[in-house]
Amino acid sequence: MSVHEHVSELDGLPVVDFSLIDEEGEPLPSAASAAWRIATEFEGDSFEKVFERFLRQVDTSQVTALVIGYWGASYDSGEVDPVDLLVKAADRLPKLRALFLGDIVMEEAEISWIEHSDITPLFTAFPGLKRFEVRGSTGLALDPIRSETLTVLRMESGGLPAAVVRAVAASDLPNLKRLDLWLGVENYGGDATVADLAPILSGERLPALRRLGLEDSEIQDEIAAAVAGAPVVARLESLSLAMGMLTDEGAEALLSGQPLTHLKRLDLHHHFLSDRMVERVRAALPGVKVDLSEQEKPEDDWRYVAVDE
């Protein structure tokens, strides 16, 4: 998934942009055959009006996947809270299983400009959610949740607040198979520490977890060292420590820790490893698909994550 391109698929369904179809007068596909994207534009109708048209024109009782795009910014007079609109319409969306909140690309708003609210009510309003993804973290709030159905949880940000990380760690998600957290940098609100990640790394609340991503972090070396001895790793199929400031120090910790040869995939793309360490990692994990692309070269010891502002 890229912050430069709108998502084209969600939960196995092609994304259909409702606003474009509505504007061009094209026939609507069947409600259950698409992941419906709802968004406004800088000079278009308000998000609330587009959402109201969607509820009127689509058989929302059959909709299983929604993609929420640009809904306005804090300086827009017509800005609304999409969480509030979704919660109020929950009875109109009884089959909703997948939700991506914030399909907003950099040409529309930098990831740090995407302003959110408390997303906790979504999990109460839509207890059948199996997949939830959110982009952006300014104003983002979350209380610990319990869900028997959630299997995928992804949070993309340039700075994920520690309070949100702790809420995820304290949540009861017995069937969660995939967890991705873009932790970001402190300058953009990413103040989580390795201690905040400890309940996730223990795996006690995540018995079904098979894919874990702790990514885009300025403390990637510290995270790698913690992961090296984390109990959850033994049951993983895929591990990602990509997009961050990983150096030889972090890679050395990984290689010196518990075996990783059981993994199907190890994603370390966008890293600051030396050529020698790149070869060591490859040689140590011959049966693992290791992504070591985007080898960055620090300038005067300055390193950077892949996504921050």
Image: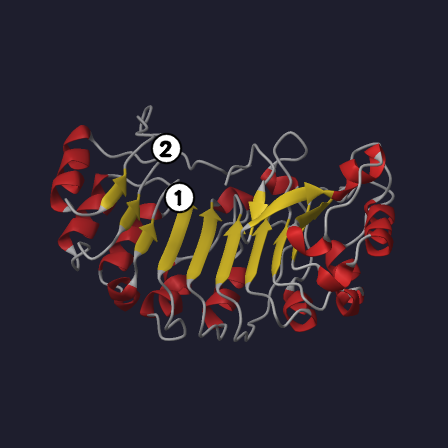
Q: Amino acid at mark 1?
A: Glu
> Badge 2: few (under 14), some or many (20 or more) residues near its Cα, within 10 Å?
some
x, y percent for residue 270: 35, 35
* Mark 2 or 1, nearer chain start: 1
Looking at the picture, does residue 26 appear above or below residue 167? above
> Badge 1: few (under 14), some or many (20 or more) residues near its Cα, within 10 Å?
many
Residue at 53%, 55% (x, y): give it: 161
> Which mark, by number, is residue 303?
2
User: Is 167 left or right of 35, judged from the image as shown?
Assistant: left
User: Is 50 left or right of 100, judged from the image as shown?
Assistant: right
x, y percent for residue 38: 74, 46
Looking at the picture, does residue 153 appear above or below residue 203? above
Q: Nearer the viewer, residue 125 or 204?
A: 125
User: Is 251 left or right of 188, judged from the image as shown?
Assistant: left
User: Is 124 left or right of 131, judged from the image as shown?
Assistant: right
Q: Amino acid at mark 2?
A: Arg
Disc 2 to disc 1: CB gap under 8 Å: yes
